[in-house]
Image (tube, rainbow, N blue to C red):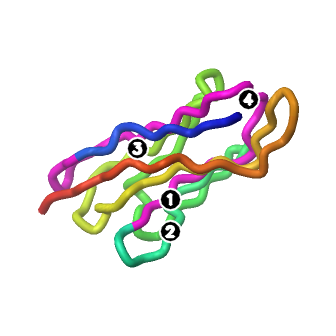
């Protein structure tokens, strides 16, 4: 079984930085694509950043130039570095992994439970 656990959320002032981590546990051989999403009450979950196995990245327009997604394959952990945070970045952030290959099977995808980021003005 594969689990994703986020950490690194918290309260920060506008202009500050946070780094979110997502640790994947289980007998993982590879992960095809990774993503960070966020959600605020009453709104749909939106893609913030994604990273594919070939190194391609994609960012929401609202975070381009401020957020960076990266991964450490040896640790099965991926990150979201968030700089110059704004109050509108306040949300619960979720990590997502697609097409996870384990020793026994390929799992279509998995989600973490989320970590809250609050940016004060």
Q: Earlier in the sequence, mark 3 or mark 2?
A: 2
- Residue 11 location, x and y as percent? 20, 48
- Judge whether 97 appears above or below 92 on screen: above
- Residue 43 location, x and y as percent? 42, 77
**Within the image, what quadrant is residue 101 found in?**
top right
**Magenta-highlighted stretch: main secondary structure?**
strand
Q: Which residue is mark 3?
A: 81
Q: Earlier in the sequence, mark 4 or mark 2?
A: 4
Q: Which residue is mark 2?
A: 46
User: Which mark is nearer the camera, 1 or 3?
Assistant: 1
Q: Earlier in the sequence, mark 3 or mark 4?
A: 4
Q: Residues within 10 Å of mark 4 (few under 14, many from 20)?
A: some
Q: Which residue is mark 1?
A: 37
SS assignment at label 3: strand
Q: Residues within 10 Å of mark 1 (few under 14, many from 20)?
A: some
Q: Which residues are magenta?
A: 11-39
User: Does the magenta segment cover residue 24?
Assistant: yes
Which mark is drawn over residue 28?
A: 4
């Amino acid at each position: 079984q594969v689990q994703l656990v986020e950490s690194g959320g918290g309260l920060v002032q506008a202009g500050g930085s946070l780094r979110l981590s997502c640790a994947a546990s289980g007998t993982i051989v590879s992960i095809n694509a990774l993503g960070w999403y966020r959600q605020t009450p009453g709104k749909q979950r939106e893609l913030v950043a994604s990273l594919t196995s070939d190194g391609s990245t994609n960012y929401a327009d609202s975070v381009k130039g401020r957020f960076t997604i990266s991964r450490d394959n040896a640790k099965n952990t991926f990150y979201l570095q968030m700089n110059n945070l704004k109050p509108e970045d306040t949300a619960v952030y979720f990590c997502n992994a697609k097409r996870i290959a384990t020793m026994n099977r390929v799992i279509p995808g998995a989600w973490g439970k989320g970590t809250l980021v609050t940016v004060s003005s």
